[in-house]
Image (cartoon, grey):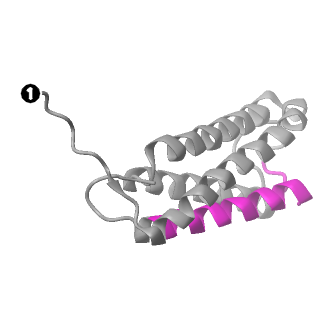
Amino acid sequence: MHEHAAPTSPLPEAARRWLLPAIVLSAVASGLHVLVMPAHFEEWFGYGLFFLLAAAAQGIYAALLLYRGAERRLLWVGILGNALVIGLYLVTRTVGIPFFGPEAGEVEGIGLVDVASKVVEMALITCLANLLRAAPAGRPSRA
C-alpha cells in the first residue's frame, strides 16, 4: 500500500478572497518594475539590475502564491520583501540613494509609476497580512 502525504488543508473562505488579489498585485508590481527598468539601466547598470531583480522576485512570488497557496512562511516572505522595497523607496526619496552608483546620496524625484508601484505593494502587503490572519496555523493551506 502506498503512503501519501497528507493533503494541504483548504483555505477558509475568509482567506480565499485575498489570495487571487495578492497574486495579481504581485504580478502588477513586477510589471511596473519591468516598465521602469530600461531607464534605470541607462542611468547605471546597478540600478537597472536592482529593478530586474525586484521584478523577477515579485513575478516569481506571484507564481509561488498561485502554485503553493497561502503557506505562512511564504506570506511572511512577501510581507517582508515588499516592505523592504517600500522602505528603500522612502529612503531614496527622502535621504538619497544609499551607497552605490553614480547618483549615490542624491534624492530621487517622485514619479507616477513609482507611486503606483508603492500603492500596489502596500495593497499586496495588506492582502498578505489578511491571508496570514485568516489562514490556519500549522499545515500549509491551498485555495
Is residue 23 highlighted in magenta?
no
- How many marks the image carries: the answer is 1
Span shown in magenta:
105-131
**Residue drawn where x is 21% and y is 38% of the image:** 5
Q: Quadrant of the N terminus?
A: top left
Mark 1 closeness class: few <14, some 14–19, many ≥20 residues within 10 Å: few
Residue 131 to residue 53: above or below: below
Q: Amino acid at mark 1?
A: Met
Closer-to-camera residue (115/14): 14
Side of 61 where 44 appears, left or right? right
Side of 76 where 18 appears, left or right? right
In the rendering, at what x and y percent does residue 141 appear? 37, 54
**Residue drawn where x is 72% and y is 50% of the image:** 29
Q: Quadrant of residue 101?
A: top right
Q: Is residue 142 visible?
A: yes
Residue furthest left in the image: 1
Closer-to-camera residue (131/73): 131
In the rendering, at what x and y percent does residue 37 appear? 82, 36
**Residue drawn where x is 91% and y is 59% of the image:** 112
In the rendering, at what x and y percent does residue 111 appear? 91, 58
Residue 5 to residue 75: above or below: above
User: What residue is pinned by disc 1?
Assistant: 1
